[in-house]
Structures are given as structure tokens and as C-alpha cells.
Amino acid sequence: MYLTKEEERMLRGDYGYGYRKAMEILVALGEIYGADRLIDIESAHISGVSYKNLGDEGLDFLKEMARDSRVRVRTTVNPGGFDLGQWRQMAIDQGFIAKQLEVINTFRRMGVEATLTCTPYYSQNLPRRGEHVSWAESSAVTLINSVIGAYTNRESGISALASALVGKTPNYGLHTYEGRGPKITVEIKFRLREIHEYGILGYLVANRIGNLIPYFKGLGRPTIDMVKYLSASLSTYGGIPMFHIENVTPESKNYEPPTERIVIDEKEFKDTSRRLRDDLDAVDMVWIGCPHASLDEIKYVADKVRGRKLIKRLVITTSRDVLLEAMKEDYISVIRLAGGEVYADTCIIVSPMGAGLKGVLTSSSKAYYYLRGVNKSKVYVASIDKCIDFALGGEL
């Protein structure tokens, strides 16, 4: 792999430990995947920043990197273990809080923005079409490749940090024309009506095609929230880093729809939906916000619960920017007055508050995967409407 003189000096250690380690990571990746060189990036997004994921070993690694290095491009991060402004309400252990704050402050010393969200594209970090970036949150990777037209591979938290420090990433995979081409046509023979159904569709398609890049026909022009749910499931269940939607994906016209083809009909979709509904003995939490809830989703919840009282625990997780915007519109006070909880900066899956949940009702098919795998919870996936109605005292 070709390196410039400056890159060689970084790799040699002339710029310090952090940059040398970052270059070692990028060069190793480039050699594994056959990259010809490193290319400049415009931004980075780092996953795995909760102390629950990192532990002391991960924190020590970050502190070593932060001793003598700073990021060279705008860099944002995924959710941490608690809401920075509401940790008392979340009943988080003080020892965990101290360690999580140390993680966040270590990132800040490197120049990283503590956005603490898996949906940076809603406000904090929206790439432009054709920009090369280095992102690690899988659902965001799939979304920005597919509907924004930015270019990124599915990075790990470590490789995204390395790219942020160097300002470059290896030129392979989804940074190339060949790597972004669709491999199979997926024809949808029915109309999806609600945003959670796009998550179910992603689960279904991923289980049928594995990690192939699909070309969707029959999806129309979904909203960004619909695409968010689809991206989250495709990346969770199939490791799919990109898809094409006919007449939506910016570069879809550059490729012919693949001749290999599968058809999804309404019967198969309904059968699949039932597989994402565990038998719940009890519901400890109704959760909306995986990936983080948008302003439109929060408004929808506020409109549904306005002037009413919740019977079941309702938790919404979102980004700090969206939370502040929702507060300006008075949506948060309405939800809290009804008895709901709204948290920024965190996610149930990477927070200690998710421990011990036996039954969860959620609109997220991605949450189904992680709550069952990490928390050993039983999970039932339903529409946002049904989630709110149940929290208000209705039946499943």
C-alpha cells in the first residue's frame, strides 16, 4: 500500500505514540483488504464508548492514545451509559458514573465531540453526498451510504478512532465504485404502512440474503425515520453496510438492477412479524428510541399522551440535540407530565439501567436482537402506536 512521506513519518513514530498506533491499525486494515492507499476523510463517528462495553482495558487504551494525539477531522461518538443531565433519576452506580465520565473526558481531550448518539445525521454530523468518512455505528453507516450518498466502510470503534486521528482511511470496499454495487434485487409486493415495519423488513431481508448489498424495488420514497429502522435491522441481522432503493439512493442509476432476485410478499412479511413477538409474562418497560428517536417520533408520542396518564413505564432515548429541540416545542414536558421518561446520551442496551429487564415492548427490531442477546429479556416488537397504547393501559 502506497504511503506519503507524512504517513511514513507517522507510522515511524515521529508524531508520537497515538498517531503511530493509529497508522499501524490503518495500514494493517489496508493490507488485509487490498487497499492501494489512504484517502482523506471529512468526518468520523466512533462506536463502543459506553464503559459497559469498554471496561478498564478499553479505557486504558484510550488514555494512552490521548496522551499525545488529537483528531484531525470532525469526530462524534455513540451513546454512553447514562444521561449526563439525569444520572440521579436513572439510579446509576457512582463507580460506573465516574468511569463513564473518564471515558468521555478522554475523548474530549482528543478533540472528539461528546454527542453520545447513534443518529448523528439528525443534526450533529450530517455528511454530504460523495464525501468519504469513517463511521462505526452500523445503522448510521448503512443509512448514510444508502440515502445520503456518503462513502464509508463499516468500521469498528478502534478503526474509526484511528481514522479520526490520521484524517484518512484505507481505500477499499465502499469507498470504491465496485464495492458499492448491488448484488441482488429485492422486490417488495405490498405496501409498508408504519415505520417499525421497515425494521421487520430489514430483519426478513437480512435473514434471506446475508451480507449482500440489495437493490430494493417497490419501496417508494421512505422517510428518513423509515430508512433508519430499515438500516438498523439490515446491519444488525446481516451486516449489510449499504442498500439501493430505486429512484432514492443517489447513485442507484449508476448500476443495473441485479438479475438475481427475491420477492417479498405480505404473507411472508406477516409470518416474519410474528417471529419478533415473544410471549411476555410481564412488561417492565415500553421503549422507543433504538436507534435514537427523532423529533417527529417524540412529537408523535407527546401528541398521543397529552393530558393522559401512563400506566406502564415508558422510556424514550434520543440525542441531546433532539432532546433540546423537543423541549423548545414543549414535547418533553408533555411526556414527563404523563409519567414518561426521556433520556439523551444513552441507550438501554449500553446502560446499566437495562439490567434485569424481563419483558420489553418496543418498536425496534434491532432492540429485539440486543435485548435478548445481551440482557436476556423477552421482547415484543410492535408499532409505536401499540407501544403507547399499551403504556396507557391497553392490551397487546
Image (cartoon, rainbow, N blue to C red):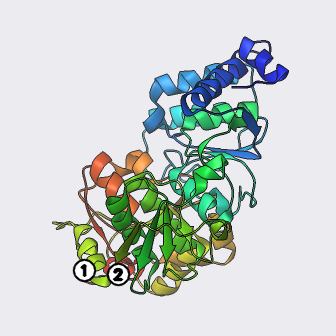
When the figure is inspected, residue 114 is found, relative to residue 62, above or below; the finding is below
Can residue 380 be seen here? yes
Could you tell me how far apart the alpha carbons at marks 1 and 2 are, in whole angstroms? Answer: 7 Å
Q: What amino acid type should be assigned to the residue bearing mark 2?
A: Lys
Please give the residue where the numbered disc 2 appears in the rendered image.
386
Toward the viewer: 114 or 3? 3
Quadrant assignment for the C terminus: bottom left
- When the figure is inspected, residue 162 is found, relative to residue 129, above or below; the finding is above
Residue depicted at x 52% and y 53%: 241
C-beta proximity under 8 Å, tags 1 and 2? yes
Residue 357 place in picture, x, y as percent: 28, 55
**Residue drawn at (49%, 50%) of the image:** 88
Foreground of the two, 196 or 242 = 242
The spot of residue 340 in percent (x, y) is: 44, 71
Residue at 43%, 44% (x, y): give it: 92
Q: Which residue is mark 1?
A: 396
Residue 71 horizontal side relative to residue 394, left or right: right
